[in-house]
Image (cartoon, grey):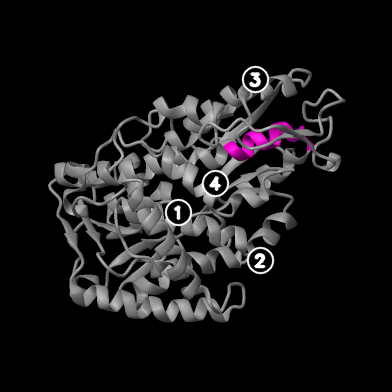
Amino acid sequence: MTTVKTVRSALPRAVTAVAGGAALALALTACAGSAGTEGGGSGEGSAEGFEYGAAQEDVDALLADLDPVTIKFQPSAASPDSVMAPAGTVFKEMVEERSGGKIEVELIWGQAIAGYGEVHDALSDGRLDMAYTLPPYQPAEFPAINDLGTVMAALPASPFHGELVANAVGNELGWENESVLGAYEERGLTPLTPLAASGGYYSVCTNPASSPDDWQGLQARAGSSSQGKLIQHLGGSPVSMEYAETFEALQRGTVDCTVGQLVPSAESGIFEVAPHLGYSTTASIPRLPGAYLAGSSFQDLPLAYQQIIFDSNALASSGGMQAVIGGNAAAVGQAKEAGGEVTAFSDELQDQIASYSEELTNEAIGNGHISEDILAEITAKQSEWDERFTELGYEDQGTVADFDEWFDPETDFLPYAEASYENGNAMEHRPN
């Protein structure tokens, strides 16, 4: 594993020599329509951009005549003390350092401006400038990203290495899908990360639920339509509710389980009322992808500001992975402290999950929003990123059951973020 530095300590390397020390020449772009003077430009120079990896002094010179701006960013975390906070704080630090303080990032915690059901409207009408969103909460408006989350069940489950692979693969799938990008464009939104795979999905229950018999009659909260169908197939009854309502529902016995990522479970203290954690070792549960989107004000910013925000968002995936994977470890520890079992699903249950996930995948492909060859594409991308991240030292050293013991919280995820950005397809969409 890569354990030399924390993400925070690696920030100067990311923001001052983003491409690993390359100091590339600034580039004058003719795309003046991408950056007006309204969002903080001071006239001349607002249409100038810079090459990825340009020297900091050259960027500073380019920004010298631009007016300062403040952007409101709503990340997923409830507070700056949350285990999920690095997804927001790392982005803020990168943007403010790379811009020399010309761009101030105001972090909005706890969905204080708009919940997930309203956040896309808040981006469109200017209440927010940037946010983490959950498009599958509105499957009719974002059908392609919902279907991609379903087929990503084909990726293997793993609390560390597998999370990195899934997020790199998902990011590429999002950028390659015209239906995903078109749905954002129709809303006047600019994708910075069109598909964030975030964390894998686990069962968190009031009683152990690792075998097929355990799932008969269970009331389980599901975050997406495909997860609801899977729960029903396993013999349970899916319940749709906002995640914020889950703790009380479990506490009161309204639901027996929630199927979700571990990081929000760790943040919200759900293991106090539902201490039993179940996980897969082979077949994955369909994901509910997120996205990092910029709102209607983004295109009004000077081009250099757009590029700083875009680059920083990509590299701040280091903070996102610190949050997701650190949250996985925290969740395992909390479950144990609460006296719960941390148990792999039985082979029979995993076989049922795998076989039905194939049905869901075929159904998703049949919807016509994703490629008919999507499984072959996922397999090829998985192999590529699996090899690359292994070379970087990101390897599992155990299982989910002892993840809290073998995961190093000082792991530096910046090399992961740099590799994903520089070798993936996001760079093709960098503002220019």
| Quadrant showing the N terminus | top left
Label 1 SS = helix
Which disc is residue 422 wearing? 4
Query: What residue does disc 2 label?
Result: 179
User: As shown in the figure, which amino acid type bears the numbered disc 2?
Assistant: Ser
Q: Which mark's residue is nearer the viewer, 2 or 3?
A: 3
Residue 150 pos. (x, y %) = 46, 69
Question: What crowding class fits label 2: few (fewer than 14 Cα within 10 Å), some (14-19), or many (20 or more)?
Answer: some
Residue closer to the observer: 365 or 244: 365
Gap between marks 1 and 4 measured at Cα: 15 Å
| Of callouts 2 and 1, the N-terminal one | 1
Q: Residue at x 62, y 19 (%)?
A: 100
Gap between marks 4 and 2 measured at Cα: 24 Å
Q: Residue at x 16, y 49 (%)?
A: 402
Gap between marks 3 and 4 measured at Cα: 22 Å
Above/below status of 338 relative to 62: below
Gap between marks 1 and 3 measured at Cα: 33 Å
Region of the chain picked out in magenta, as a range: 300-311
Residue 327 pos. (x, y %) = 32, 43
Q: Which mark's residue is nearer the viewer, 1 or 3?
A: 3
Q: Is residue 323 magenta?
A: no
Above/below status of 185 relative to 392: below
Looking at the image, residue 18 sits to the left or right of residue 31; the answer is left
Query: What residue does disc 1 label?
Result: 167
Q: Which mark's residue is nearer the viewer, 1 or 4?
A: 4
Question: What crowding class fits label 4: few (fewer than 14 Cα within 10 Å), some (14-19), or many (20 or more)?
Answer: some
Query: What residue does disc 3 label?
Result: 57
User: As shown in the figure, which amino acid type bears the numbered disc 1?
Assistant: Asn
